[in-house]
Image (cartoon, rainbow, N blue to C red):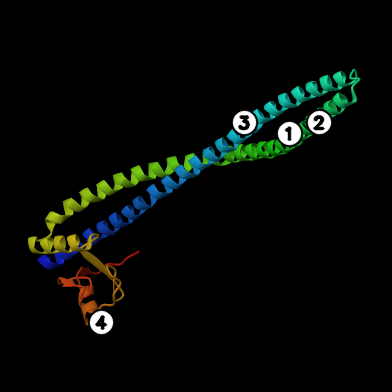
Amino acid sequence: MPVVEEDIRYLIQIVKKDMEIKEKKRMLGNIPPRIKAIDRELRKMDDDLNETKQILDKLDTEKRHIDQEIKAHQAELAKKKEDQNVVKDNKVFKAMNAEIEYISKKIDQAEERMLVILEDGEVRRGEVAAMTNKINSEKNKLVAEKEKLEQEMSVTDDALKILGDEKVRILPHISEGVRRLYGRILVAKGDSGVANLVGDICQGCYSRVPPQTAHEVRRNDQILKCEVCGRILVYYESK
């Protein structure tokens, strides 16, 4: 087999490895953002639940405080009424009556606040129950997805190393001049120095190749480059 045709045969193997490497890297690049998104979802679930629990704890603390306040006011009111019953002086009676009205008003205000706390507490307890149910149903799924993604990342990383090793073993079989040309183009393009021709379209930059050039590329018997992206053009049947 002529040297050029043999070079092209190895270049086809190289571009196939390059495309596999490109796809693996694409997959690998998509995994970390999804893992970060899962971590954010998990943190938000916990943060929202903890925040609601803290609000509920504050409401319960305030409820206990108001309950004590109401009992104290009620005891004070009962004492004022008892004292008022033995008062003979009309002026003192009126003064004590004003105190009783003031204490009664304080009790009414405290009881109104107590009702608000009880209603808000019921709402918050419902939220806690709903959040807990959501966490129980979704958290395990998210954790399982994250573990699967981490496993996929490890497998893909291993596959990349294998592809890289396979490519390294192919390169020495290519003649030095073509190998250097491929290396320069690879550095410039970043993904591959070779591109397959599908129909008359370069798969490196998706530009249309002139008909005569496309015909010559399909013969795989000379080194030809894409006029647009500069990659070496080869031809093989793609799946």
Q: Regarding mark 2 in the picture, which secondary structure is present there?
A: helix
Earlier residue among tags 2 and 1: 2
Residue that label 3 marks: 57
* Eye-nearest disc, 2 or 1: 2
* Eye-nearest disc, 3 or 2: 2
Residue that label 2 marks: 104
Compare residues 217 and 19 and report the one nearer the observer.
19
Q: Marks 1/3: CA distance?
A: 15 Å
Residue at image location 56% in from the left, 37% down from the top? 51
Which amino acid, by three-letter code, is at mark 3? Asp
130 with respect to 199 (left or right): right
Which amino acid, by three-letter code, is at mark 4? Pro
What crowding class fits label 3: few (fewer than 14 Cα within 10 Å), some (14-19), or many (20 or more)?
A: some
CB of mark 4 within 8 Å of CB of mark 1?
A: no
What crowding class fits label 1: few (fewer than 14 Cα within 10 Å), some (14-19), or many (20 or more)?
A: many
Which amino acid, by three-letter code, is at mark 1? Met
Q: Marks 2/1: CA distance?
A: 15 Å
Q: Regarding mark 1 in the picture, which secondary structure is present there?
A: helix
Q: Quadrant of residue 98?
A: top right
Residue that label 4 marks: 211
Residue at image location 83% in from the left, 26% down from the top? 96
What x and y, as percent, mark residue 110?
74, 32
What x and y, as percent, mark residue 23?
33, 56
Q: Marks 4/1: CA distance?
A: 86 Å
Earlier residue among tags 4 and 1: 1
Residue lying furthest left: 176
Residue that label 1 marks: 114
Earlier residue among tags 3 and 4: 3
Query: In the picture, which quadrant includes the C terminus?
Result: bottom left
